Image: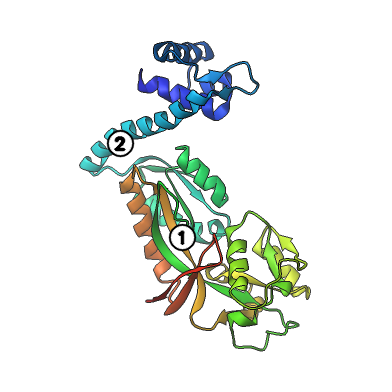
Amino acid sequence: MTITQLHYVLAVAEHKNFTKAAQKVFVTQPTLSMQIQKLEEELDVLIFDRSKKPIQLTETGQKIVHQARNIVNESDRIQDIVDQQKGFIGGIFRLGVIPTVMPTLLPMFINNFIKKYPKVKLKIEELSTQAIIERLREGHLDAAIAATPLELDGIKENVLYYEPFTAYVPPSHRLNKVSKIGVEELDIDDILLLEDGHCFKDGVINLCKASRNYDDDHFQLESGSFETLIKLANEGLGMTLLPYLHTLDIKDSEKKNIKMFKDPIPAREISLIYNRSELKMQIIEALRSTIAGVVKGAIAFQNVKIISPMNNTTKKELQF
């Protein structure tokens, strides 16, 4: 049994096709098939059921793949240890970012990071929280930026910042004349939401569940972008909630429609998340320090309450 064979097994398990897996690991399909067959003969088990299309793992194969990931990760740790000992910060680093963070946070830190760490080759993907979790567990991401707390087995969370919720309230709305909004004044019936799959939407719903004005059967108009939600609000179709950093980029003519919440301000926790194996920690720490440095000046609120993206409970109140 070799590490190379385990890499091949993981590639086939991911792509469910020997040809695509061979392309992924840069070998010919006969070479990959032969090595996997050798491993199966050595173990005296079938890892893959080749009679099914697409190819499926056998019951034993599922357990082997799970262990193979652990072994491959641990083998990668050897090079990681050497890099850390040498103080080397470089190589390919695969980062996932949720859609409601990508457009505002990425421009704030990416140039600083590239200039400071030119040997790091960042590969950044915009992914939903669920896709991020799956890709982290499968070893296809080194880290991700997501709303937390997620509190998942095998995944660590390193808090980057706390981002307040804000309300975008057009002139025609009942709350437009209010200087600061109380959570209890929210009514889910007139809040425009992001479409399903966005954890910010889940946070908004959880915030409304904390008030008295929540009804699962109400009519909702949903969209895939904050820009669209703002346009719909301007048309008199309701109000919407935005992450604070997004409000920094809206038109000057629309800034008057931004309302803050009363203390404690509802907020989301944004973290770097990564596997507990803690591979490439030197790059993770470099990302953390770079992001924290640029965001610190943009977000400065004294009293926030963290809204969980996963359920309708609040995590804690923070004074800072």
Determine which residue is flagged by label 1: 149
Lateral position of residue 215 relative to residue 129, left or right: right
- Horizontally, residue 256 falls left or right of residue 89, namely right
State which quarter of the image contains the C terminus.
bottom left
Q: Which residue lies most toward the front here?
A: 59
Q: Residues within 10 Å of mark 2 (few under 14, many from 20)?
A: some
Residue 142: percent from left, percent from top? 42, 43
Amino acid of disc 2: Arg
As helix, strand or loop, the secondary structure at mark 1 comes to loop
Q: Earlier in the sequence, mark 1 or mark 2?
A: 2
Front residue of this view, candidates 108 and 70: 70
Check residue 241 in the rendering and tell me which mark sits there, or answer none.
none
Picture residue at 67% right of the left edge, 56% below the top: 196
Mark 2 — residue?
Answer: 77
Residue displayed at 52% across by 11% down: 30
- What x and y, as percent, mark residue 175? 68, 84
Task: Name the quarter where the N terminus is drawn.
Answer: top left
* Residue at position x 41%, y 71% in the image: 297
**Picture quarter containing residue 15?**
top right
Q: Position of residue 262 (x, y in %)?
A: 53, 84
* Residue occupying the point 74% across, 74% down: 238
Callout in the foreground (1, 2): 1
Q: Is residue 148 left or right of residue 128?
A: left
Relative vertical location of residue 309 with respect to residue 33 in this rendering, above or below:
below
- Crowding near the residue tagged with mark 1, few <14, some 14–19, many ≥20 C-alpha atoms within 10 Å: many
Q: Position of residue 214 (x, y in %)?
A: 68, 73
Amino acid type at image mark 1: Pro
Q: Nearer the viewer, residue 233 or 221?
A: 221
Q: Are marks 1 and 2 in contact (CB under 8 Å)?
A: no
